[in-house]
Image (spheres, rainbow, N blue to C red):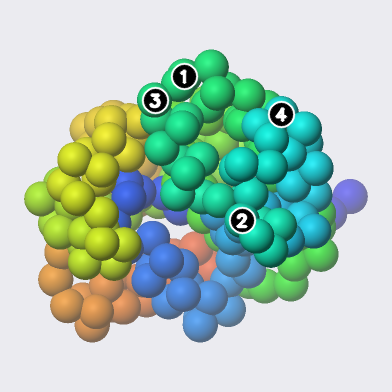
Amino acid sequence: MKPPAFSVGLTGGIGSGKSLVADLFAARGAAVIDTDQIAHQLTAPGGLAIAPIRHTFGDAFLTTDGALDRARMREHVFADAAARQQLEKILHPLIAQQTEAAARSSAGAYLLFVVPLLVESGRWVDRVDRVLVVDCPEAMQIARVQARNQFSVAQVEAIMATQVRRSERLAVADDVIVNEGSPEAAAAAVERLHHAYLALAAKKQAGGL
């Protein structure tokens, strides 16, 4: 029986550069499955999550074209823990289903799951062969998200408060990419890890991992 594909769980705090790193791995042949992208697909017009979101929260939390109003929902769930749990009960099972389907159909040297809340979920650490954390100083996270999303410092800090502390994330990491320098430095780090993952994937395929 063929063993499961070698898998890496990539995570990091908001603004750490997960997407940049994931794109670099994809360019080298990894099969990248981004749970955040899956969540966006589920909450786009006609997405599988739209009907239960409408039923639970009402049309006020949808845009005129029928997508999730992400800004309004974000403000709502940050202020109401029960509402956040309701949203998670809708999204998490659907994300899990779509992630499994994507993994089964993916072709690549190995699987790279991009999971922003990998540590917080409590499910992913034991599911993947390696945990890769993209890390940078918190001040850099805040500056990047402000520049990207035009959020206030308070808004960014509120999002960060819903995530585990940087030290907790690093404590479960098998590998770390410190993304506080140039794109070239990040690419060099990805290149080194890519070759290591190729070797581990071959070892697992041979039944030695």
What residue is shown with label 1? 81
Residue 206 is at least partly visible in this image: no
> Label 4 is placed on what type of residue?
Thr
- Report, in whole angstroms, how far the alpha carbon at label 3 lies from the one at label 4: 17 Å
What residue is shown with label 3? 79
**For numbered disc 4, what is the local secondary structure?**
helix
> Label 1 is placed on what type of residue?
Ala
**For numbered disc 1, what is the local secondary structure?**
helix
What residue is shown with label 2? 63
Question: Closer to us: mark 2 or mark 1?
Answer: 2
Neighbourhood count class around disc 3 (C-alpha, 10 Å): few under 14, some 14–19, many 20 upward: few
- Report, in whole angstroms, how far the alpha carbon at label 3 lies from the one at label 1: 7 Å
Residue 125 is at least partly visible in this image: yes
- Report, in whole angstroms, how far the alpha carbon at label 2 lies from the one at label 4: 15 Å
What residue is shown with label 4? 56
Q: Dots 2 and 1: beta carbons under 8 Å?
A: no
Q: Is 166 left, or right, of 201 in this rendering?
A: left
Neighbourhood count class around disc 2 (C-alpha, 10 Å): few under 14, some 14–19, many 20 upward: some
Q: Is 127 left, or right, of 133 in this rendering?
A: right
For marks 2 and 1 on the same chain, the one whose residue lies earlier in the sequence: 2
Residue placed farthest to the right in the image?
A: 1
Neighbourhood count class around disc 4 (C-alpha, 10 Å): few under 14, some 14–19, many 20 upward: some
Residue 180 appears in which quarter of the rendering? bottom left
> Label 2 is placed on what type of residue?
Thr
Point 73% across, 39% down: residue? 54
**For numbered disc 2, what is the local secondary structure?**
loop
**For numbered disc 3, what is the local secondary structure?**
helix
For marks 2 and 3 on the same chain, the one whose residue lies earlier in the sequence: 2
